[in-house]
Structures are given as C-alpha cells and as structure tokens.
Amino acid sequence: GAVVSQHPSRVICKSGTSVKIECRSLDFQATTMFWYRQFPKKSLMLMATSNEGSKATYEQGVEKDKFLINHASLTLSTLTVTSAHPEDSSFYICSARDLTGTSGEQYFGPGTRLTVT
Amino acid sequence: SQKIEQNSEALNIQEGKTATLTCNYTNYSPAYLQWYRQDPGRGPVFLLLIRENEKEKRKERLKVTFDTTLKQSLFHITASQPADSATYLCALVTNDYKLSFGAGTTVTVRA
C-alpha cells in the first residue's frame, strides 16, 4: 500500500520556539494532504487541508498564523508550529490522498509527538 | 450538531471470538465510510472502505456493514487474535474528501 512518512517522529522544544514537521508521500503523488492533531485517548481532529500550489484551508478554530502549512510539491507538505507553547503539545498526524484511488483513500503518516517545555 | 459515536470506549474479548464494534452518526450524509486501526503512538492504518450503496464488505477476517437508514456501521473481527488488539476508528468521508473520526474503540483480545 501507499506509504506516508513524517519527520521527526518526536520533538521536544522550548516555549516560544518554532517547530517544523514534514509529511511526505513516498510512492504516490498527493495534491491534497491533511493535518490532524490527537490528544491522548481522543480522536483525530482535522486542523487543515493542504493543497499543492495554493493556500491551505483551515478548520474552524485553528489559527492559520500559528500553524503554518506549506505544500510545495506533490509529495511534500510541512506544518510549522510557530511560537510553540505547552498547550501545543500533542500528537500531529498527516495524511495524503492518493490521486489514483477511486474513492479518495487516505494514507496516514506515523505521527509526530511534539512536547513543548 | 454532527456527531459520530462508537459504541464503547473499550471491548475485551477472548481469543477466537468475534468482536463487533458499532459506529453511529447523526447529521451527516457521508459518501462513504472507512475503518482504521490505530496502535499506540502510531498513525491510523486504513482497513476497509464501504460506499453508501454497499451493504457489506469483507476483507480476510474483517467484515463491515453500512446501513444508511439506521445511520450505522458495524465492524466485525472474526476469529480474533491477540494481534488484533488495537484501537479501531470509524471515519465518515464527505464530498470534499475530509475525514471525520469517531473517538475509537480499544479492543483487547485475551489469549
């Protein structure tokens, strides 16, 4: 099946710094990628839809200036958490939609655990 | 408001038995529904997709049903094994390909 990677898998940063997370589709092209966050024992919450070559669309309540998304190519999207605070600590997961899939199957990355101290 | 509810937070079963998980939704008109498996600290892994005009889908020991009248999907794991222990998520897919997830049911299969 299709493979999506994320880097880094874990990151610890200090309050006030920025962190960039990469999401790559390894063996397929994805015009659309999605970014989620997940709190312990909770479901995935969609944060934003990343569109190759255009601006990301954010879900209600998600600050676009806080969570910067760049989708520069058909295989790479990045999420930058700017001026991180402890409440931004979470599990961030991306997914990519396979263009060739008939029903828009999405494949998820392994996730990035962010801890802000 | 829109809601996706999975029947229980946790399900403990004996190896060899069938696990049945429920996903109910309100105020959605999904194009299709997907089931995912998630292990601790990992991203979800796609298992099965069922369209609104399909009643049942099977894949090896997994079976999914979809009743758009009841607004419900059932997910069955037959002949369960300890390796099936994980959290199972249902997700509704709307026309813009966005996924809305339920909170998940954590299945523990005892040997």
Image: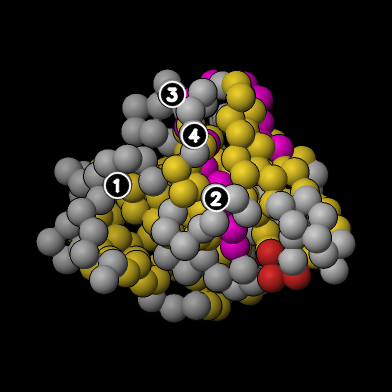
> Residue at label 3?
A99
Other-residue count near label 1 (Cα within 10 Å), few / some / many at <14 / 14–19 / ≥20: some
Question: Can you say whether B69 is above or below A107 in the image?
Answer: below
Spatial distance from mark 1 to mark 2, Cα to Cα? Answer: 23 Å
Main secondary structure found in the magenta portion: strand
Q: Residue at x 62, y 68 (%)?
A: A39
Expressed as whole percent of the image width and height from the top left, the position of residue B14 reads 56, 74
Q: Earlier in the sequence, mark 2 or mark 3?
A: 2
The answer to whether the residues at label 2 and label 4 have Cβ atoms under 8 Å apart is no
Q: Earlier in the sequence, mark 3 or mark 4?
A: 4
Does dot 1 land on a helix, a strand or a loop?
loop
Q: Is residue B92 visible?
A: yes
Q: In this picture, which residue range is highlighted in magenta?
A: A22-38
> Residue at label 4?
A55
Question: Can you say whether B96 is above or below B29 in the image?
Answer: above
Q: Residue at x 28, y 67 (%)?
A: B2
B27 left or right, relative to B50: left
Spatial distance from mark 2 to mark 3, Cα to Cα? Answer: 26 Å
The amino acid sitting under disc 3 is Leu
Spatial distance from mark 3 to mark 1, Cα to Cα? Answer: 16 Å
Does dot 3 land on a helix, a strand or a loop?
loop
Question: Can you say whether B65 is above or below B20 in the image?
Answer: above
Could you tell me which quadrant the N terminus of chain A lies in?
top right
The label number, if any, that marks residue B94 in the structure image:
1
A108 left or right, relative to B53: right
Does dot 2 land on a helix, a strand or a loop?
loop
Do marks 3 and 1 share a chain? no
The label number, if any, that marks residue A64 in the structure image:
2
Residue B65 occupies quadrant: bottom left
Expressed as whole percent of the image width and height from the top left, the position of residue A83 reads 74, 57
Spatial distance from mark 4 to mark 1, Cα to Cα? Answer: 21 Å
